[in-house]
Amino acid sequence: MQHEKRHTNDLGKDPIVPLILRLAIPTMLAQLVNVLYSIVDRMYIGNVPDIGDLALAGVGVCGPIVTLLSSFASLVGLGGSPLMAMRMGQGRNDVAKKILDNCFLMLVILSLGLTFLFLLTKDRLLMWFGASPDTFVYADTYMTIYTAGTFFALMAAGMNSFLICQGFSGLGMGSVVLGAAMNIVLDPIFIFLFHMDVAGAAVATVLSQMASCAFVLLALRSKKMPVRLGLGRLEGKIVRRVLSFGFSPFLIVATDSVLLIVLNTVLQRYGGAELGDTLVTCATIVQSYLLIITMPMGGMTLGTQPVVSFNYGAGQPQRVRRAIQTIAVLCLIFCAIMLVVTHTLSPLFVRLFTSSEEIARRSVVYIKRFTMMLIPLAIQYPLVDEMTALAQVRRALYCSLFRKVVFFVCLLALPALFGPEATFYSEPIADLLAAVNTSIFFFLAFPKVLRTCGEGKAISV
């Protein structure tokens, strides 16, 4: 028993700051490694002789669609895991198991339905969402293979949340590291050694996700899990509660994808035949850089949600308050460091993707524009995610959608008024206004939320 305790985290009793660090650092690193899935693909593709820049633009068009698919993993994983953590905090592991089993079945159904739907509509979607006649063939090849592996992608990402919410952040990190490491090794083999180019990158990604999926499911079946995965049966009440809880993180990820699709479409339209593909290639590199910031920060905030949810369910408001303060400080420190990195090392990052002087020069400028408001972004992320952990789904959704609406308006207005390059100012404008709005909203609502701590009013299943 003592041996077991050394390897798990007591969400209700361990000191908050060390506990947050033990959960945040592995999940942050796991998401940083996870970024390598897309970045390594794009880096190798961008360096394929003769077709690199066009192929990179084609895969860049696929990026938002891939993220849109993964948002359904957030719907179930981030919808079910806070509920499960709250029930564990209340000592109701029987209900926690029902939630886990229902989420597994939901992911099975969703992955099969999405595979069929996207394979049926992908050609039309790619042309609508920013592919040009020159880049379509690369986008179509990548998307077809990736979509065929939707089951493994959704299951690996969605079920990983249920490892973390039981205190096994190390295993959660291990599943991601396994997939990313395999991807790094397999990419050059399939792309260059087997001369498969874009198809090779997609095959390497799917095989890596298969490995992560197997790791997560076997871990959840392990006897050391406080709540083990089983088959169970779907229960309408649980399904509705999970969907209700997960709708906010799902919509956050899904609308991010939609905004990136709009970004690519706008750049293609206003850039025209002369500049469109170049700007989409630059946007792909810029988004790859932004992922290095947002994915680890999201890992910190989402990975530490179980602490907030568990203690909210257990009726410990002081621990809830202290946890949120610690998470916010971690995000601010991380973004301050990344702001320095942006202004010193971004040219080196860009060179990993392209040998074109023009694309490299433009990409560095656009990266600096896109990340101007990283400090406000460090406020937005933890406040929105911890509102979700406190069962304040509608409030979290409002704060997230406010930022998306500002971003969307800027995407439409800035290039129309000032030309296509002005599009890259949409991100910092949205980040600043959203952080101000969310801060005001959170600090007005937070005291009222803490007064319901432990009552379970919003978390019945």
Image (cartoon, rainbow, N blue to C red):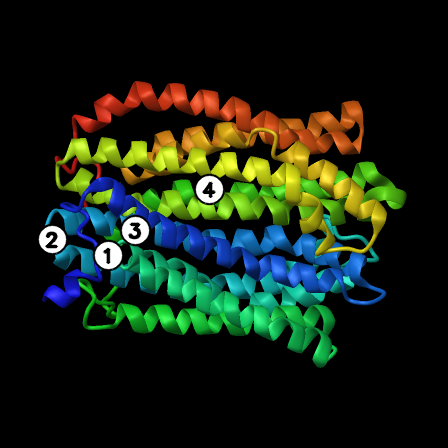
What's the mark number on residue 166? 1
Q: Is residue 39 left or right of residue 243?
A: right
Q: Is residue 41 left or right of residue 19?
A: right
Q: Earlier in the sequence, mark 1 or mark 2?
A: 2
- Would you say the residues marked 2 and 3 are in contact, meaning their CB atoms lie under 8 Å apart? no
Locate residue 108: give its quadrant. Answer: bottom left
From the top left corner, tell me how far across and down residue 212 is, in percent: 43, 69
346 or 280, which is in the foreground?
Answer: 346
Residue designated by label 4: 251
Q: Nearer the viewer, residue 288 or 251?
A: 288
Q: Residue type at mark 2?
A: Arg
Q: In this rendering, which labeled residue sits more in front, label 3 or label 1?
A: 3
Instruction: Name the element at disc 2.
Output: loop
Which element carries disc 1, helix, strand or loop? loop
Say which of marks 4 and 1 sits in front: 1
Q: Amino acid at mark 4?
A: Leu
Name, please, the residue furthest toward the right. 274
N-terminal-most mark, 4 or 2: 2
Residue at the spot x=66%, y=73% of the render? 188
Instruction: Give the number of the mark in front: 1 or 2.
Output: 1
- What residue sits 34% from the left and 56% below the top? 161
Question: Which residue is denoted by mark 3 in the rendering?
Answer: 22
Amino acid marked by disc 1: Gln
Q: CA distance from mark 4 to mark 2?
A: 29 Å
Q: Are marks 4 and 1 in contact (CB under 8 Å)?
A: no
| Residue 285 percent coordinates (x, y) | 69, 49
